[in-house]
Image: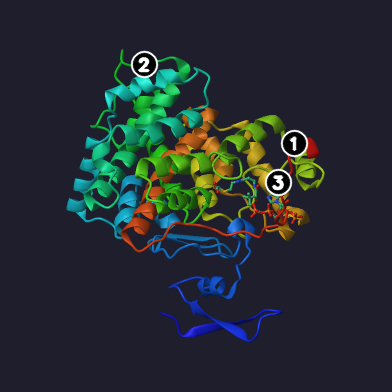
Amino acid sequence: MSDKKATLTVDGLDGSIELPVYSGTLGPNVVDVGALTGKGLFTYDPGFVSTAACESQITYIDGEQGVLLHRGYPIDQLAENSDYLETCYLLLYGELPNAAQQEHFVGTVKRHTMVHEQISTFFNGFRRDAHPMAIMCGVVGALSAFYHDSTDISDENHREVAAFRLIAKMPTLAAMSYKFSVGQPFMYPDNSMGYAENFLHMMFGNPCEPSNISPVLAKAMDRIFLLHADHEQNASTSTVRLAGSSGANPFACIAAGIAALWGPSHGGANEAVLEMLEEIGDVSRIDEFVSRAKDKDDPFRLMGFGHRVYKNFDPRAKVMKEAADEVLAELGIDNEPLLAIAKRLEQIALEDPYFIERKLYPNVDFYSGIILKAIGIPTSMFTVIFAVGRTVGWIAHWHEMISGSYRIGRPRQLYTGYPQRDYVSIDGR
Ligand code: CMC
């Protein structure tokens, strides 16, 4: 597998250690440090800044160039020419579908959109003001209690059915979490509709009237799902892989991914961006917020800026910005104040040495909230929508791991606690 080697010498250790170096099809070479444990050594890399945790063929990112490829296809080409379900097929199966494969895939997803009727009673256990991400963590994990015929991870058919169920049911559960919070009846899916259209129907429809979903909004929603579909080994995907490496069932693993996504450093940033833009409130206050972001004594960060991997424009942010312009124009919203603030903030930050030196560029979350707001999605649902879109990426990675050779994920540590000491009884402490 490898004809290159790295040689490591360590103070206090006789001789040197030869480590194999692997080359992928793209990207940096990878040093296999697996042999170190036999020499009494571990590597130390908090935050996994330099660690490849697995081999994968799904998604490639070049952070310096701002490139994102799904199975080799650039994200901007997919956003322009494909749709969410076709991209799901690509991520899961590795190739774009032909017409028959596409028809079969879309038809199968549609047949799985409804959730077990008892799941609707499950929602009543939540407080009415529960955050929809809290509800999603619970109900997605609970799917493992309802679909026993797709939890045997050693059965390829079970794994595939679990994938279909998750992709199909996430929009239904997401819309239910919203309907619950506003006290409206849950809407059943309408399988005559497209994926994104159906989601909007379940979000905004009501049983008294036929839904009338704007094709412009459905297309924008579909593009948002597509742009979030996968992003290689990010925190939530790595969480799904780690949970899955113990042999946990797919629904439990995806619930773990949802939990990891929720934080503001990851998927929760889209909600935080909109709150920040609203707090800024006016272009005249941007400088104040930029100064706060640069102040080391202030924990405030410019939400929607910076990325662990991208040291250039996030290519999804570029598409998202264009989409925001298009959607607002098509909806006839020609002076959305938050878009004006966002554009000016981006301009100011990109000219500021602090952001230039640290290579902090707008990320996917910077413009998505503006489109979601224009569509009428409440802010608390933004991260849920990210979760719906990312579900396919989580499953594709989980499936890639389970169908290959894998071991339970078990990181080691640099222990800096007490050395061994003897127990002291309570009267001696
Ligand atoms: N505003 C101000 N300063 C920042 C920001 C920001 N948004 N992001 C990073 N920095 C500074 C940080 O203070 C540090 O400065 P210094 O070197 O002087 O200490 C430097 O840039 C490097 O930051 P880091 O925290 O070491 O970088 P990281 O790779 O660990 O974190 C990040 C990446 C995305 C968590 C971070 O940039 C951030 O908190 N951004 C805001 C939240 C956000 O938009 N998250 C969405 C990420 S994209 C979608 C997704 O993954 O879900």
Name the disc covering residue 423, or none.
3
Disc with the residue nearer the chain's start (2 vs 1): 2
| Disc 3 and disc 2 in contact, CB within 8 angstroms | no
State whether residue 79 is above or below residue 425: below
Q: Amino acid at mark 1?
A: Ile
Furthest residue toward left = 100
Residue 29: image location, x then y, percent: 52, 75
Q: Which residue is mark 2?
A: 185
> How many residues crowd mark 2 within 10 Å: few (<14), some (14–19), many (20+)?
few
Q: On the rendered structure, is 294 left or right of 14?
A: right
Q: CA distance from mark 1 to mark 3?
A: 9 Å
User: What residue lies at 35% left-to-right and 30% top-to-bottom?
Assistant: 172
| Whether residue 58 is situated above or below residue 27 in the rendered picture | above
> Residue at left 37%, top 32%?
142
Callout 1 secondary element: helix
Q: Nearer the viewer, residue 216 or 168?
A: 168
Q: Label 2 sits on what residue type?
A: Pro
The answer to whether the residue bearing label 3 lies less than 8 angstroms from the nearest atom of ligand 1 is no
Rendered-image quadrant of the N terminus: bottom left
Q: Amino acid at mark 3?
A: Tyr
Q: What is the tally of numbered marks visible in this picture?
A: 3
Q: Is residue 257 left or right of residue 146?
A: right
- Badge 1 local density, few (<14 within 10 Å), some, or many (20+)? few
Q: Which residue is mark 1?
A: 426
Instruction: Give the CA distance from mark 3 to mark 2.
Output: 59 Å
**Horizontal side, residue 184 vs residue 278: left or right:** left
